[in-house]
Structure formats: C-alpha cells, structure tokens
Amino acid sequence: MKKQLLTMAATAGFLITPFNGEASAHENKYIVQSGDTLWGISRSNNLSIEELKTWNNLSGSIIYKGQALTLLAPHSHDAAAGGSSGSTVSYTVKSGDTLWGIARTHGLSISTLKSLNRISSDTIYPGQKLKVKGSANTAVPSLPASTGSYTIQRGDTLSGIASRHNLSVSQLKALNNLTSDIIYAGKTIKVSGAAASKPAESQVAAQSTSKVNELISEAKKYIGSPYKWAGSTPAGFDCSGYLNYVYGKAGISIPRTVASIWSATKHVASPKVGDLVFFETYQSGPSHAGIYLGDYKFIHAGSSRGVEISDMNNSYWKPRYLGAKTTF
C-alpha cells in the first residue's frame, strides 16, 4: 500500500510539473516570477530582449507575475512532417531570428547547423534558407576556374558568398581589400586570384558620394511611417528595422539589430552625412540609431512619432549620444 501511494505521488508530481515550469522541450515556456525583468530572463536563457519581445508580441518591457513567456521563435512543423528520415529539411530565416534560436528549435547545436549550411560566421538574414536536416557532406559546387568574380545581389552576406565559393571570410576580404563586413549590391568582387590592390582614393570618394545621396533620398521616402516593434517594412518600422530596410534598398547589407550594426561598422570621430549615429536609451549600450543628415540632424524611426528627423542637440538625445560609425 505504501509503495502504491509513493507511485501515485510520483505520477501526480510528473503530471503537475509542466504547469509550474517548462512545459516540455518543445513548448519551452517560462512563467514570470515576482521581481523578474525581461533583461534578467533574456540573460538567463541566452536570448536578446528583442527576441523575447518579438516572440511574445510585447510592445514594451512590462511583464507581470504568472505571465507565460515563450523562449522559442515561432516555427512550423510542416516541412518536417512531410519529410522522410533521410530527406533534407530547410528553414527560411525570419526577421529577428538567430542561429542559436534556429539551432535550438530544431534540436541542433550551432556548430552542426553551421556545418549543414557551410557557413563560418553567425550572420544570417531574413529570407535566407538554411538546412536544418540532411547531410553536411554535400560539397557546394565551385565556380569554373575561368570565373573569378561575383556580382553582389541584394540580401547577400560576406559569409554566404565566401561559403558558396569555398573561401573563408578573411580570404574573401583579403582578395577584395575589404576592412569591414559591409557589402553593396551591384558591386563585383573577386572570388579567386590574388589579393586586390587599393583602389584610387578619388574612385572611392566618388562611389561613396553616389551611395550617400541614394541612401539619404531613400531614407526620406518613409518619413511619417509608423513605429512598430520588430517592424521592418513601411507599414511599420522599429529603429533597426528601418535602417536595415533603407540600407538594403540602397544596396548596402547591414545586420538587423542596433547592437550588431554597431559591431559591424567602423568608428568615426565625428559623423558625416550618411553615417550612423547611436544612442543609449532603454538599456545600456547602443539601443537606438539613425542616419546623420548634417547640421546635427538625423533621421530615424522613433517610438513616439515613427520615422522623423530629430535634432541631436535637444535635451533628450544629446545626453544619450554614444558615437558615430560608418558603412562607407
């Protein structure tokens, strides 16, 4: 009788546990406790605050005790359900996705996911297709020996181009004398041969001026577009979604989040027209950014009025200014 009671209690405990904590490895929810913050939850679970907000449809940072938060990106099992055990299953990257989140969702390690897709960096972009099941041994066909150049397409990344041509990112950068990971659609780069010599300064200046003009013209088209958390279209932008969209339209590939844009771009002592200006707002470090227009004005997607032009010297922005960086 005593043994039966213990067995029943153990069974009851097993049944009750999912409701008090993590429901299952697939559900992976977190129940907010008294004193919790989004920052603390994100740090404990190796996520960004932006991922938590996007996956849980949160417009602000307020959470409440007892609230259930998902710790996984929204995903579908349609592809997996129809595939056999030996088939290849792919996943299309969505805005806000990370390699870590995709790997976790599909029961992979980051190194396995990278190996499956022959990528060497953590940079991914919306619309990119990643293998999440299949063989990692299939070699990516290289270009014929006579073809030593590649014209960059919108949405390309250095890591993706390097992978397709059996190069490392550092080799690709050396071939083309690149000092950052920023690339421009329409530009032809070398994918084989000897390292590039430095282009003439006058040629670089002319290319940069043309790009800056195109960028500013594109940025101003969306003045008045509303603010939307995790938004990345004219129907609604958040600050990094706006930058990613505008730069993409101008043929310049930049990362999706403010922190990753900060890391990928080059520091400048003072901003020039077309450079990025960064601010520390709701969390420590770079958390907001815009495009410098000159005369201490910048254009950005603000949370109050959407895409607008603001003055860097006003009482709100001036004390929050962190610095300027450039993609040119």
Image (cartoon, rainbow, N blue to C red):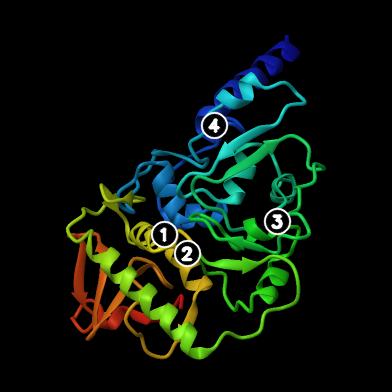
Q: Earlier in the sequence, mark 3 or mark 2?
A: 3
Amino acid at the residue labelled 1 = Gly
Q: Earlier in the sequence, mark 3 or mark 1?
A: 3
Q: Is residue 121 visible to us here?
A: no
Write the residue at 70% across / 18% down.
6
Q: Position of residue 109 (x, y in %)?
A: 71, 46
Name the residue tied to disc 4. Answer: 27
Write the residue at 33% across / 69% down.
214
Badge 1 vs badge 2, beta-carbon distance below 8 Å:
yes
Quadrant of the image occupied by residue 138: top right
Name the residue tied to disc 3. Answer: 163
Frontmost of labels 4 and 3 is: 3
Q: Position of residue 271 (x, y in %)?
A: 35, 85
Q: Earlier in the sequence, mark 4 or mark 2?
A: 4
Q: Position of residue 181 (x, y in %)?
A: 57, 70
Q: Earlier in the sequence, mark 4 or mark 3?
A: 4
Q: Earlier in the sequence, mark 1 or mark 4?
A: 4
Where's the N terminus, which quadrant? top right
Frontmost of labels 4 and 2 is: 2
Badge 4 vs badge 3, beta-carbon distance below 8 Å:
no
Q: Position of residue 97 (x, y in %)?
A: 51, 48
Amino acid at the residue labelled 4 = Glu
Marks 3 and 2, how far apart in space? 18 Å
Marks 3 and 1, how far apart in space? 21 Å
Write the residue at 70% across / 71% down.
170
Name the residue tied to disc 1. Answer: 248
Is 305 above or below relative to 69?
Answer: below
* Structural crowding at the residue carrying mark 4, measured as other residues with C-alpha within 10 Å and reported as few (<14), some (14–19) or many (≥20): few
In the image, is 60 to the left or to the right of 207?
left
